[in-house]
């Protein structure tokens, strides 16, 4: 694309913009949308179908309402606050500016800007006027929405009228979700596990069965805010009921592609459904929900209980007590097409350490390196030495170990060259210079001998 200059040597901006628009307009509409989507995500870091399964959680009203610039340009006002209810789309200052360039940019930016819709209900008052607010402020948006995030606060206690208002509010939220007929991803954050969300659950299930919604996340806002070890598991009937209805529906299980679960607990019945039913899943994340089962303690990792799933490529287990390191080996072997596996803060203190595999284990015919292709990525966080040695049987092209004890990692790698076969890149946390000088040299020697790139660019997922 040529750049014309004025006599003074400065860029002729008007001519340049005209040339840019002429060339841009000649591109196929799909490519133009893709370019704007890329700029949108790169410049503003807006989530596009990604999930809040890591880090600390805050409601959007805590972080956005004072600083977030809601769109008020010709695209229309995109935030409605009715007492304590917040309805907003993913605003982006860059899209605002780009949309003012021309009608063509405006149409594309409008399409991208309204990809994400957040519905936030705080803890003060219940207000049943969400549908009217939605229709008034974003009347042309529903067909653009691809991602919906619903943040439900705690239900008001008696008197009886407050319960009726809660039900009206839930019904309104379900109506809004139903209006967004092209939604692909729904995230539900709950703070009150006993508050009735039947209408929302029914609407979500209908959209999954219809093949519209393919990605579902059910998140406990309390767990995302606090990593304490114990939670009341007796007051989560509603999210469990929602998960149960999804897993009991054959149509839903056939359509679902991604499932994220951050819950206080799932019982044996739910665990068995999760093992058997959703065989079309591409991505599964479980955080905390897999707690100790007193009747059948190793139920989640009886491989005979898991249905084969040739679609599953990404599995993440976080703070799952039953996900012991030695049980991960048959799990990885079972899911032959798995490409990425994250194991963070799993296991339980009463599980005694296991002996490392004997020398020469990698040459045995039934070991993972000889029965399945290597993972593309293996991420381990907060593992003891014996857990690292056990999980070192998993072949992976890239290994990330986000552990602050580099001495432990160095000693594990110096014991045997069989650990983490097929690895060509090892990512660890940045360390202090004096610490690296002492222990880093050991690890660097091993990595050079095994032709593994050592990179100190890892990050802690769950501080």
Image (spheres, helix red, strand yellow):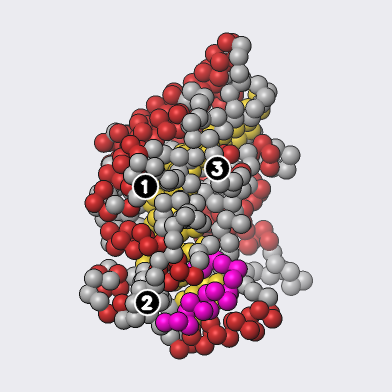
Residue 50 place in picture, x, y as percent? 49, 50
Instruction: Evaluate whether residue 355 shows in this view.
Output: yes
Q: Describe residue 272's horizontal placement relative to residue 317 as left or right.
A: left
Q: Which corner quadrant holds the N terminus?
A: bottom right
Q: Describe residue 21's horizontal placement relative to residue 314 as left or right.
A: right
The quadrant holding residue 458 is: bottom right
Residue 17 place in picture, x, y as percent? 62, 58
Label 1 Cα neighbours within 10 Å, binned few <14 / some 14-19 / many ≥20: few
Where does the magenta region start and end?
Answer: 400-416
Q: Describe residue 132's horizontal placement relative to residue 376 as left or right.
A: right
Label 3 Cα neighbours within 10 Å, binned few <14 / some 14-19 / many ≥20: few
Residue drawn where x is 74% and y is 72% of the image? 9
What is the count of numbered marks? 3
Give residue 309's mark.
none
> Is 412 contained in the magenta span?
yes
Give the CA distance from mark 2 to mark 1.
31 Å
Closer mark to the observer between disc 2 and disc 3:
3
Cβ atoms under marks 3 and 1 closer than 8 Å: no
* Mark 1 lies on residue: 297
Looking at the picture, tell me which residue is in the foreground, 160 or 14.
160
* Mark 2 lies on residue: 421
């Amino acid at each position: 694309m040529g750049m014309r200059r004025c006599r003074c040597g400065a860029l002729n901006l008007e001519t340049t913009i005209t040339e840019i628009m002429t060339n841009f307009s000649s591109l196929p509409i799909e490519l133009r949308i893709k370019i704007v989507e890329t700029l949108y995500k790169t410049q503003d870091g807006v989530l596009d179908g990604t999930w809040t399964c890591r880090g600390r959680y805050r409601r959007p009203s805590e972080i956005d309402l004072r600083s977030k610039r809601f769109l008020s340009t010709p695209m229309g006002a995109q935030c409605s606050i009715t007492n304590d209810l917040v309805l907003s789309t993913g605003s982006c200052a860059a899209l605002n500016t780009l949309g003012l360039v021309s009608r063509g940019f405006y149409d594309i930016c409008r399409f991208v800007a309204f990809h994400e819709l957040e519905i936030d209900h705080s803890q003060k008052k219940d207000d049943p006027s969400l549908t009217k607010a939605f229709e008034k402020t974003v009347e042309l948006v529903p067909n653009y929405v691809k991602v919906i995030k619903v943040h439900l606060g705690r239900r008001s206690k008696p008197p009886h009228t407050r319960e009726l208002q809660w039900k009206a509010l839930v019904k309104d939220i379900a109506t809004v979700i139903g209006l967004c007929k092209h939604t692909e991803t729904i995230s539900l954050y709950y703070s009150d596990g006993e508050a009735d969300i039947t209408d929302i659950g029914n609407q979500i299930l209908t959209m999954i069965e219809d093949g519209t919604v393919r990605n579902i996340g059910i998140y406990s806002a309390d767990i995302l805010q606090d990593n304490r070890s114990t939670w009341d598991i007796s007051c989560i009937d509603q999210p469990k009921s929602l998960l149960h209805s999804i897993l009991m529906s054959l149509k839903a299980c056939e359509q679902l592609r991604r499932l994220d679960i951050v819950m206080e607990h799932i019982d044996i019945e739910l665990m068995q459904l999760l093992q058997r039913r959703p065989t079309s899943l591409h991505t599964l994340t479980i955080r905390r929900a897999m707690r100790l089962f007193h009747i059948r303690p190793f139920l989640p990792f009886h491989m005979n209980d898991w249905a084969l799933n040739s679609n599953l490529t990404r599995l993440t287990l976080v703070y799952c007590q039953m996900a012991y390191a030695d049980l991960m080996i048959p799990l990885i072997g079972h899911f032959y097409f798995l490409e990425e596996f994250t194991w963070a803060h799993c296991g339980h203190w009463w599980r005694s350490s296991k002996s490392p595999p004997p020398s020469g284990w990698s040459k045995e015919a039934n070991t993972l390196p000889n029965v399945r292709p290597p993972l593309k990525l293996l991420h381990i966080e907060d593992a003891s030495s014996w857990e690292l040695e056990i999980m070192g049987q998993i072949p992976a092209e890239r290994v990330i170990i986000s552990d602050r004890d580099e001495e432990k990692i160095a000693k594990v790698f110096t014991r045997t060259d069989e650990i983490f076969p097929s690895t060509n890149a090892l990512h660890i946390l940045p360390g202090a210079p004096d610490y690296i000088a002492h222990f880093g040299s050991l690890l660097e020697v091993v990595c050079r001998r095994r032709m593994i790139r050592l990179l100190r660019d890892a990050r802690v997922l769950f501080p």
